[in-house]
Image: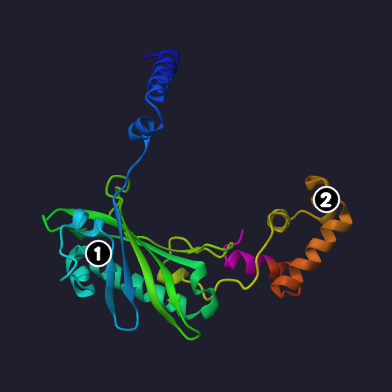
Amino acid sequence: MSWKELVKSAASLLAELSEQGNRLYNDNIALKLDSYYFIFDCVNIKIVSFSEDFTRILGYDTDTFSMEGLIDIIHPDDQRYFILHEKQALTFCLSIPIEKQTHFKIVHDFRVRKKSGQYIRILQQTVAYEINEVCVLKTLVQHIDITAIKMSNEPELHFIDLKGSGSIYNVREENLLAPPPSFQLTKREIEILQLLDQAYKSEQIAEKLFISIHTVRTHRKNLLNKTECDNTIDLLKKVKALKLI
């Protein structure tokens, strides 16, 4: 099939699907991934509530399923990763102020065994659901079946900042960072940092971004103050270590 024939065929398919209406269109083209939720009581170390889809997807009875049960159905090759990632996530969460706990989503994946014996790969997303002035009381946990879209058997861990630019992706023991930055960078500040990292001078940055030299100098001064750095070298080292550029 030539490129023109492919484009024509695709256009015909889209026209046909559109005529079916939005619902049928979505049924044909949308990627649907099974998912369920549960609420985990961090104080009493137990699952306190499940969404209705839990039993439909995994096959287990929610009345008898427990956190120990979850660990038992994790693939033997993934159990050590699961425990390691949970420990790293705990270390990370303890390193940030309690008021920022709800800003982050802990994401990692592993394989679990359904009641039928079949293994599926689960993407687990965890967010703080209930906190007090001292600690996280409950978390909301979502499991998404990503078997169809992830072929690699290597589990990954990510800390996703829902409020700013402090996300840490593909966490390893050697690159697990301390607390995320207490500051946030604007789009313009990031652009300036990227040019500074390429050894651009203030005059060149002004020309490149179509702004005045005075504006560039103001941004650079603000960046030093915001990051509590004394010079540009320290500034670039800090933002790189925090993976902000």
Most foreground residue, 44 or 237 = 44
Q: Residue 180: x, y in percent?
A: 56, 71
Mark 2 crowdedness (10 Å alpha carbons): few <14, some 14-19, many ≥20: some
- Residue 206 higher or lower than 231, as above or below: above
Amino acid at circle 1: Asp
Rendered residue at 84%/49% (across/down): 211
Q: Residue 54: x, y in percent?
A: 23, 59
> Outermost residue toward the bottom?
134
Span shown in magenta = 236-245
Helix, strand or loop at label 2? It is helix
> Outermost residue toward the left?
116
Q: Residue 215: x, y in percent?
A: 85, 57
Lower position in the chain sequence, tag 2 or tag 1? 1
Q: Which image quarter holds the C terminus?
A: bottom right
The residue singled out by tag 1 in the image is 78
Most foreground residue, 230 or 53 = 53
The residue singled out by tag 2 in the image is 206
- Residue 132 higher or lower than 238, as above or below: below
Most foreground residue, 138 or 201 = 138
Amino acid at circle 2: Ala
